[in-house]
Image (tube, rainbow, N blue to C red):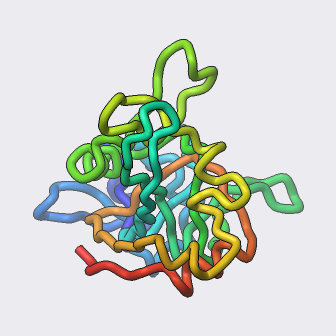
Amino acid sequence: MSLLLNVPLAEKENAISKGAQWDQIARSWFLPEDQYDRLMEVDHWIPEKNPAIILPTEITIVHADRPCWKCQQQNRMIAIAGNYFFEKDINDRDEPVWLEQDFFTVFQQISTISGNLQTFLKDNYPHYRLATGPATENQYWLNHCSSCSSIQGDEFLFEEEGVFNPTEKEAANKLLLRNFNLKYAPLIDAVYSLGDHLRLINEFAERGEDT
């Protein structure tokens, strides 16, 4: 796992002193995971503005089959998940810090996605995209029906007993988890939850081949 950085040439020596390394092939700066205790030192070089969550380079996509609420066409819905992640927070001294959250969760209400994850989604899951228009008060990345293009809102997919909020192992077993490896850690701004439904997903969902 490594985090892409945008380091100006004039600041490269400073970046090196803070743990940053140069990728000669990709021609880019990055922070290796074994230096993540220095995330705040390189925070101002993270390309995305006001990043909230850093995912691992191995991301998990949760797949679920559900009919469109409008046309009833069966659709493959997805959600982005992570086995662990880093979250920006404020400590007791009112200082910004990056905290490692060492648990599995599924993200919803995703408002921001880094460029590398956007490219991955466009190539692999084009029906999961930024929702725009008068019906969306705020802009979020959401599933869309592959037939009629209607937005499939997170409030329905993540509600109690929704496809991404199973209450029984039989419902969790209908889900599919697939892992994908990205070169650099993707960043998102999103909401996540804790609960027994996550244990059910992690324990009983089917596992697809890693990519």
Q: Residue reaching furthest left?
A: 25
In the image, residue 78 above or below residue 140: below
State the residue at coordinates (20%, 65%): 23
Q: Nearer the viewer, residue 177 or 49?
A: 177
State the residue at coordinates (60%, 69%): 105
Q: Name the quadrant containing residue 196.
A: bottom right
Q: From this viewpoint, is residue 49 visible?
A: no
Q: Quadrant of the N terminus?
A: bottom left
Q: How many marks?
A: 0
State the residue at coordinates (61%, 26%): 138
In-image side of 146 versus 150 (left or right):
left
Residue 12 horizontal/vertical position (percent): 33, 54
Q: From this viewpoint, is residue 150 visible?
A: yes
Q: Name the quadrant containing residue 30.
A: bottom left
In the image, residue 133 above or below residue 65: above
Q: Residue reaching furthest front?
A: 72
